[in-house]
Each structure stands twice: as structure tokens, then as C-alpha cells.
Amino acid sequence: MNSTAVAPNQQSWGGPDESRENYLNVAYGIKSWLLTKDHKRIALLYLISITLFFFLGGAFAVLIRLELLTPQGDLMQSDTYNKVFTMHGVIMIFFFLIPSIPAVLGNFLVPMMIGARDLALPRINLLSWYIYTVGGLFTLFAVAYGGVDTGWTFYTPYSSVYSNSNVAVTAVGIFITGFSSILTGLNFVVTIHKMRAPGLTWFKLPLFIWAQYATSIIMLLGTPVVAITILLVALERLFNFGIFDPSRGGDPVLFQHLFWFYSHPAVYIMILPAMGVISELVTAFSRKRVFGYDFIAFSSIGIAVLGFLVWGHHMFVSGQSIYAGMVFSLLTFLVAIPSAIKVFNWTATLYRGSISYETPMLYAFGFIGLFTIGGLTGLFLGTLGLDVHVHDTYFVVAHFHYIMVGGAIMGYLGGMHFWWPKMTGRMYSEGWGKFGALVIFIGFNLTFLPQFVVGYLGMPRRYHVYPEEFQVLNVMSTAGASILGVGYLIPMIYFIWSLRKGAKAADNPWEARGLEWLTPSPPPTENFDVTPIVVDEAYDYSPREAEVV
Amino acid sequence: MSDHSHSVVAHQFDDMPQQKETTTLAMWAFLLTEVMFFGGLFGAYTMLRNRFPEAFAVASNSLDLTLGAVNTAVLIGSSLTMALAVHAAQTNKRRQIILFLVLTIALGGVFLGIKAVEYNHKFHEHHVPGAGFHFEEVPDWVDVSRLNYDLEKATETFFSLYFAMTGLHALHMVVGVGIMLVMIWMAYRNRFSEHYYGPVEISGLYWHFVDIVWIFLFPLLYLLGRHFLLEGGH
Amino acid sequence: MSDHVVPIRVYLVIFSSLMVLTLLTVWAAFLDLPGSYNTILALSIAILKATLVILYFMHVRYSSRLTWVYAGAGFFWLVILLAFLMSDYLSRDWQRLPQGW
């Protein structure tokens, strides 16, 4: 796997690399980017936007961890702290995690992996990015004008009646951005149904595509419900509608039902694409067919469907009927099964594989371990009796950060490293890549492992004042966060550096299987000179390659 | 005479059938999201009506049944004219496409006009939620003392839902009218033929969906309390 | 999605049926039926009307199975929302705990 070799062109472009036309150099100028219909350029537009929001959300995280260094509320007032953790959550969830893999990697790869020239609806794709940007601007406006203090969950009647912060503006921003998500999901579903290359049947598709498909189903069917719910909150604030306000006959628990109907499946929007990435990484870096392809494919759909049936586990202590609670708890245990199936199958894929430890694979290993911890602690939370004890504590915070950061973000970074050569035509520094992954892994665990403990011991979430005895664990967590912050900067730096100084990438630097690797790095606008005709199964590594040397 | 402009297949598609099937499927996917969008409101309605059945019945009876029924008929009629417009596009009859689209818009306009009249009534009766809300017509058949909730407050909840649901629906109709205007313009420019009528069909799908929403809104908002109006109603 | 041209006669029949069903639902609203039968009847008529619009005006009767799946999925997911939502509220009275919850 000589990463600096330039492989012979498989397409008849001719000429030296520099003059070869690709999607990046086919046209220059801001208009060619802002009016592009090319899914690959739109993916990069999203990459820039979500990275900016990631660092903004990260800045709020820094403020949180700084404040929590001491048990007293000394850095900021309570109201301010409420705003800080709200903005951290809102930005990270709606403006970073939910778009991340689908809008960047999905947009770039879905057409290529199925042998198409573009998505089904390129202009809708561009519109989706503009909608995302407009929604983001609304939210930035809200941040600039004093933020929101309701928590990202916007529980009523605080959010709809009593809060004095910029709820309506933020609600509108999220409402608008929701349509970006809907349009992306719509585009993917239709594309995957209708634009697969000849011979590419469903069960020959890369598992990344199955994961994107399942994610898109959730985006389509869940997002509209949170959209109408958040709109109703805005209406309640602006026009005095009384649907969630108990003093006027409304019901706050109704809000919670409607909110979590989307927001639970939303976490699967955040994790399923990452699981899709891991399937690609594990096969490529063990040079082996995936174990249990059908199981992984069906488990993605299973997670998407079952994920819609468990939302009440966020409401065990809200006054919800205990019988409904029991049903939701049972279903929560069931939805863990398909996730576990994936972990087993990835592990079995590794067995007797020819494993190499390039940076993407390090992230994949990190994902498998950390996601397992996060997932198992979810079962704790899904247990009715136990949840009474740990609900609204740092145990919950640790749980979802293990999944979202230890899982989803690691999957995102692993995917970015894997496909960076394809997207940019450049290789990053492998040494720095490994180093960055290690720093992130250490920083992450130091940040969030103590939070399981401090949460179980009783420290509530969303509080900036806490009992003295929790300080040691909080200091550890903040120390970890500073390491993690540095860790995230490292890939930023070497990725940008690689754009100018990185070695030119071969068409298939990892010698992986998949239609996207048949194109030059970076690909031409139309992706394929001639539509490929697919004969092979997915992950068609020859058995010889997998033999341990 | 009939000069059809070339129906161009977009570059990402291989041929016209793929383009048509894909774009139609895309509209269906979009309508799915609309089902869930309105679905949230139907969920809120179901839950609140279950909690305040008497208040909802009383409030519903204050709506104008005749106007509501007429609007239902008007909208169904507009669905017919829409279907006929699609038919005309499929059979290459340019004048008829325009005629039926104009009729569809006209009927849509009638619907919106009647809605405006109804909203005006509600405004004057102080049935708009908010500071000025006041509901006074509590009928005989309700024994307010037996209720475990405040009837007037609960009727305000009904009207919040009424305005949210019919308002959102009306907004969708306005968008629909806009879409039809674009279709009329395209038909006028002779863009459609028996080989290329996808946009008309897709617009029709949207319009029919808006009709279906009203088919459910009408009984749920206007009809639920009528049977209490009979003498000796239970 | 079909290339099937539905005869105008079919549209007119469906239209007439929809009008009749509208009159029927208004008339039935005044019947004093026990329990929640008024609601069930009204919803059944509405579902029937919606089905006619979907099958004939929206051409689903003549469309591919994929279109049927899409149309069905939307309805099915709405039912999930309503059913699970109401399962909470309707089962709250089942509890016989002394202090509630």
C-alpha cells in the first residue's frame, strides 16, 4: 500500500496530474461554488459550515468545563451558564452532528458508491445547504443577542411562556435547518432507489449506503414532527396559543412526547452514518469481506424503525403512565440488539483479517470500544428503576457523549481520514494522523469517564454549582477536555497543510473495494466516464489478501 | 402549430422514464414528510380532545358548519379539476391544461376566501387565543359543575389548535396556488406533451394531498359536537 | 407515477362519490350514537374519502409497488405517533398507586 505512488489512470484522461480536470479545478470563482450543482462541491460547502459550527459549539464546551473547575458558580451567573450549555447542545446537535456525516461524506460518496453521476436532485441538494446556512444564521443571531437558556430540549412551559431569552428566534432557526435535513434525506432515499448502476442490486451495496438509507428514512419521517413542535412553541410565545401551557389547559408532557418522537430517532441519525463508515473501515483495513453482511444491512433498518418506538425512555419521570414506561423500556432493550449485532459482526470481520493500523482504522477501533460503553450505559438508563436514580445526572451526559463523541465523531473523523485522499487528491501526514487519534482518544476518556462516576454519585446535569466532594472528578474532566480540544485542532492543522504540501494521492491509496475508488483522486465532475456495470459482491477482497503473513 | 420544446433529460439521469419515476417518487417522499408535519398537530389534537371532550364539542359547534361543508365541497371540486388538468397534459391538450388549472386556482381562491370570512367571524366573536379571548356560549347540555377542568380555558385550547391546523393548511394552499401559476405559465409556453407532463402530475400530487388534509380537518374540527345539539343529546 | 391515462369517467365517478360521502358525514354528525361511535364513523368516512383520492386522483391504483410502500409508510408512521402518544394518556388511569405515578 504505497501511499505516495500515483496509480495509472483508469480513466482515459491523459496528461500529467496537474492538468487533469477534476471537480475542484473545473471552474474557479465564488460563483462556481455558490451556484454549483455538483454533489462533491456541495459536500465541501457543508464541510466548511459544519466545521465552523463545531468550533463554536466547542467554545461553549470550553466555557462549561472552565466553570465546572470549581464547585462555586464563580465564572458566570446561573442564567449565563444556562445559556452556555443550551447553545453548546443546540449547535452541536442541530448544526454539527446531524448534518456531519450525511451532508459531507454522504453527499460526496452516495452517488459515487452507486455508480451515478450525481444525486437525483442536485438543485435541491444546493438548496438544502442554503437552508442550513439561513437556519444557522438565525441561531447565530440568537447567540449574539443573548442566547437561549432553556436547554436544547426546550421544555415547556419555560420555553413557551416564562423564559426571557431568544427562544423564538432560535426555534425558527432550528425549524428552518430541519428542512435542510429533510431535503438531504429525501434526496438520498430517492437516489438510492432509482439511480444504482446496472447490476448493483440492494445486497451488493456498500454498507455505508445501507446506513445512509436508514438514516434518511429517519430524517424524512422524524424531522417534520420536531419542526411542527418547535413551531408551536414559537407560536405559543408570539401569539399566545395555549397548547403546552398548563395554566391555559395545555400539557407540557405533550410537548415532551412530540419533541422526543423526533429527538430520540435523531440520535440514530447521528450514529447510523458513523456505523456505516465503520463498516467500510473495518473491511478495508482487515482486507476481508464483512462478516454477516445481511445482518448489518438489516440491523441498520431495524435501528431506524425500532428507534421510533422508544422515545418515552426520556420521560420515565415526567408523569408518563407507568405502563407506557414499561413498554418503552422493553422496546429500548430491543433496539440495543441490532447495534450489538453490528459490533459482533465487525469483531468477527477482524478475526483472521490482515489488519493494519492506519489512522482511519485507529478511529474505527476507538469507535467500537467507546460506542460499546456508551451503548451499554444506555441500557442502564433504559431500566425504569435505575433511571429514577440517574435521570438528569451526569451519568446521562457521559452516556450520550460516549455515543456522540466517542462514537459519531470518531466515525466522522475516521471517514474523513479514509476519504480525504479521494476528496482532495492529497495524503495527510500519517504520523500526525496517528498522533491526533491518540490524543483525542485519551482526552475523550479523561473528559467523560469521570462524568459517569460523578453522575452516579448524584451530581445533576445543567448545574454549575455542585458539592465540594465532586470537584476532583470535575477537574479531571476539565483536564481531559483541554486535551481533547487540542486533539481536535491537530487534524484541522494537518488536513489544511496537506492541501498544499501533502503527497499527491493515488486513485486508490488504500487499495480498498468500492466504486468510488475506481475514479481518479480527486474525481472529475461527472464521477464516471462510463457508468460502471457491477458484477462483484461488496467488499470483494480475495481470501488470499486476508491471510496473515 | 403544436410546437413542443424539447423535454431535456437532466444530466444525472439516463433517460426520461428514469427522470419521471425519480421525480415522482421524490414528491411522494416529500408528501410523507408533510403527513408527519401535520401529524404532530393531529397528535396534539387527539390528546387534548381526549382530555377536554366537552369543551372541544362546545367550541366546535361555534364554527360555521355550512361554510365548512361548502369549503369541503369546493376543495374536492378543485381536486377534480386538478386531475382533469393532469389528464389534459397526458393527452396533449394545451388549452384544457390551462383551463383546468385556472379552475383549480379559482376554487382554491374560493376556499381561501371563505376561510378568511370564517377567521373574521372568529375574530369578532373573541375566539382568537390570547389576551382578548372570551368564550361565552356555554350551552345547556353541558353541566359545567361536573367537569374537572375550566371549560372556557379548554375552549381556548381548541381554538389554538383550530387556528394552527387550518392556518397551516391555508398556507399550504397558498403555496399550491403559486405552484399552479407556474404550471399555467409552463403550459402556456407549450412545455407539456404526452411525453413530458411530469411537473403537472407532481403538482397534482401536492394539491391532492392538501385536499386530503382538509378531508380529515373538516370532521375533526367542525363535526365532533353536532350530535350534542339534538334534544336530549347525551 | 403511471403512464396509465385514467379515463375521465372514472374521475367523475370518484368525484361524485366524494361529494356523497361529504353529505353523508355531515348528516351522520347529527346522529346521536353511543360512546365514541360518532368519531369512529366520521373518521371511517374520512379514511374512505382519502383512500379514493389517493388511489384514483393520485394514481396510486396504477402505480408501482414502491409508490404503494411510500404512501403506506406515511400513514403507518402517523399511526405509530398517535398510538404510542395516546398509550401514555389512556393508561394513566389504570394505575392504582396510592399517590399517583
Image (tube, coloured by chain):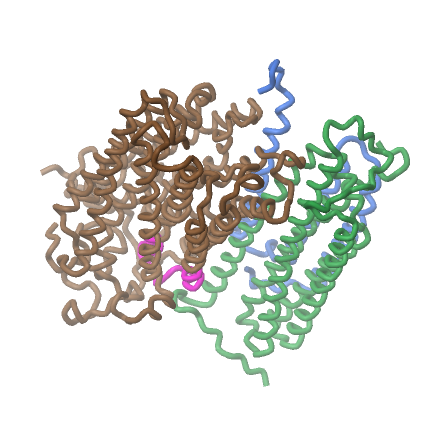
Residue A472 lies in the magenta stretch:
no
Q: In which quarter of the image is the C terminus of chain A?
A: top left
Chain A: its colour in the image is: brown
Drawing shade for chain B: green
As drawn, the residue found furthest toward the top would be C98
Q: Residue furthest bottom?
A: B1
Display colour for chain C: blue
- At horizontal 44% and vertical 70% (from top left) the residue drawn is B9
Secondary structure, magenta segment, majority class: helix
Residue nearest the observer in this picture, A24 or A495: A495
Residue A380 in percent (x, y) is at 39, 23
- Residue C100 quadrant: top right
A544 left or right, relative to C84? left
Residue A461 picture location, percent across and down: 40, 30
Residue A191 or residue A494, whichever sits in front: A494
- In the image, residue B189 sits, relative to residue B126, either above or below, namely below
Q: Decide whether residue A106 is among the magenta residues.
A: yes
A538 relative to B138, above or below: below
The region drawn magenta spans A104-127
Number of numbered discs on residues: 0
In the image, is A26 to the left or to the right of C101? left
Please determine whether, in this image, residue A506 is positioned above or below residue A440.
Answer: below
Which residue is at 59% across, 39% downward? C79
